Amino acid sequence: MAGPSLEQWISDRGLQQVNDPDVDKPVYRLPPPDGRITLSAALEERISARIRDARERRNLSRSKLAPLLGITEAVYARYEASVSRLTVGRLIHICEVLGASPEELLAPAAPHLWGENQIKVDLLLACIDKLRGFDEETLQDVFSLLDRLGKTGTSGHGGNGAASAAPFLSGPPSV
């Protein structure tokens, strides 16, 4: 597979080399608009805090949540304290059990992945939250509108990405 060179990929994505003390080798990260790249340990701490906040907002104790995840309270406490790192699978399981969206737990840790400023982040997250409540027919209508806006360039992004969701219009993806 040819594809772009490593240097071209780094340049095209605007990635910056970072020396993260938790990683043995240099890594490349996308800098947020303020230019301050959050290192791995700080990301883990932010995610851990969001999980704790989500659990507390739902009035669920650690002792009640841990068995739902198939782990002991002590193991779960290490996740909230950012002593143990979460796997993606465990994070998904926590979302399922808490009834939390991935955005609720991840967006505050890396808001630059949802927008270039806080207003755009907040708007996008509010839209995602609103979309979750729509039935399939309404979602198809909303997608059609967004697709038309993308084709006319009204979205400000020239329609990039609008066609990528087209396969889902005929039904959910098979797994």
Image: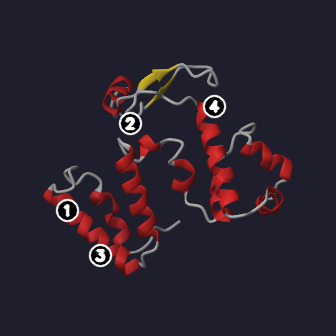
Q: Of callouts 2 and 1, which one flags the residue occurring earlier in the amino acid sequence? A: 2
Query: Residue 44 location in percent, x, y?
Result: 63, 38
Q: Label 4: which residue?
A: 41
Density class for disc 2 (Cα within 10 Å; few <14, some 14-19, many ≥20) is few
Q: Which mark is residue 7?
A: none
The residue that mark 1 highlights is 149
Q: Is residue 49 above or below residue 128?
A: above
Element class at badge 1: helix
134 left or right of 163 in image: right
Q: Quadrant of the N terminus?
A: top left
- The residue labelled by disc 3 is 141
Q: Which of marks 4 and 3 is in front?
A: 4
Marks 1 and 4 sit apart, C-alpha to C-alpha, by: 40 Å
Mark 2 residue element = loop
Q: How far apart are marks 3 and 1 (CA)?
A: 12 Å
Mark before the other along the chain sequence, 4 or 3 = 4
**Disc 2 versus disc 4: distance between alpha carbons?**
34 Å
Specify few, some or many for label 3: CA neighbours under 10 Å numbering under 14, 14-19, or 20 or more.
Answer: few
Q: Which amino acid does label 1 sit on?
A: Leu
Going 45% across and 67% down the picture, which residue do you hit?
173
- Identify which residue is drawn at 63% across, 59% down: 95
Residue pictured at 57% horizontal, 52% vertical: 105
Q: What residue type is labelled 3?
A: Asp
Which sits earlier in the primary sequence, circle 3 or circle 1?
Answer: 3
| Res 93 seen here | no
